[in-house]
Image (cartoon, helix red, strand yellow):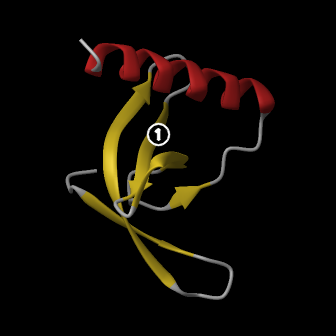
């Protein structure tokens, strides 16, 4: 993804704009992830998988969620220094 913002559509088709915190490419699974947040509520970070065309997909696997949380924690530790 080559942008600083992302538009996510909810179940009702409403567009919501978020700021991208960072993206991550997992070489082990060949999956790409985008970590993003609402600029009006920077406390909550969302994460989705995305494909080469920029389509977002939910993370549904527990092990994959655990890995995403580890990646976010590692990023947070680096940005605190």
User: Residue at 66% of width from left, 88% of height from top?
Assistant: 12
Q: Please indicate whether residue 61 sits to the left or right of residue 20 in the image.
A: right
Question: Left or right: 48 with respect to 76?
Answer: right
Percent across and percent down for residue 22 are: 32, 38
Does dot 1 land on a helix, a strand or a loop? Answer: strand
Rendered position, 55 above or below 52: below
Q: Residues within 10 Å of mark 1 (few under 14, many from 20)?
A: many
Pick whichever, 34 or 51, lies toward us: 34
Along the horizontal axis of the image, is 45 left or right of 77?
right
Residue drawn 29% across and 18% down? 80
| Mark 1 lies on residue | 33
Q: Is residue 55 left or right of residue 1?
A: right
The x and y percentages for residue 34 are 42, 44
Is 64 above or below relative to 33? Answer: above
Write down the quadrant of residue 61 in the picture: top right
The answer to whether 10 is drawn above or below residue 57 in the figure is below
Q: Position of residue 5 (x, y in %)?
A: 28, 61
Q: Of residues 4 and 81, which is closer to you in this image? A: 81
Say which residue appears at 38% left-offset and 51% top-offset.
52
Q: Position of residue 23 (x, y in %)?
A: 35, 38
Looking at the rendered image, the quarter that the C terminus falls into is: top left
Residue appearing at x 54%, y 48% in the figure:
48
Count of numbered marks: 1
Q: Is residue 9 above or below residue 30?
A: below
């Amino acid at each position: 993804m080559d942008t600083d913002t992302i538009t996510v559509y909810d179940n009702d088709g409403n567009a919501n704009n978020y700021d991208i915190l960072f993206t991550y490419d997992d070489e082990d699974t060949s999956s790409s992830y985008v970590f993003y947040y609402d600029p009006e509520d920077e406390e909550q970070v969302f994460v989705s998988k995305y494909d080469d065309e920029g389509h977002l997909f939910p993370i549904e696997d527990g092990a994959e969620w655990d890995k995403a949380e580890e990646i976010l924690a590692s990023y947070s530790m680096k940005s605190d220094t």
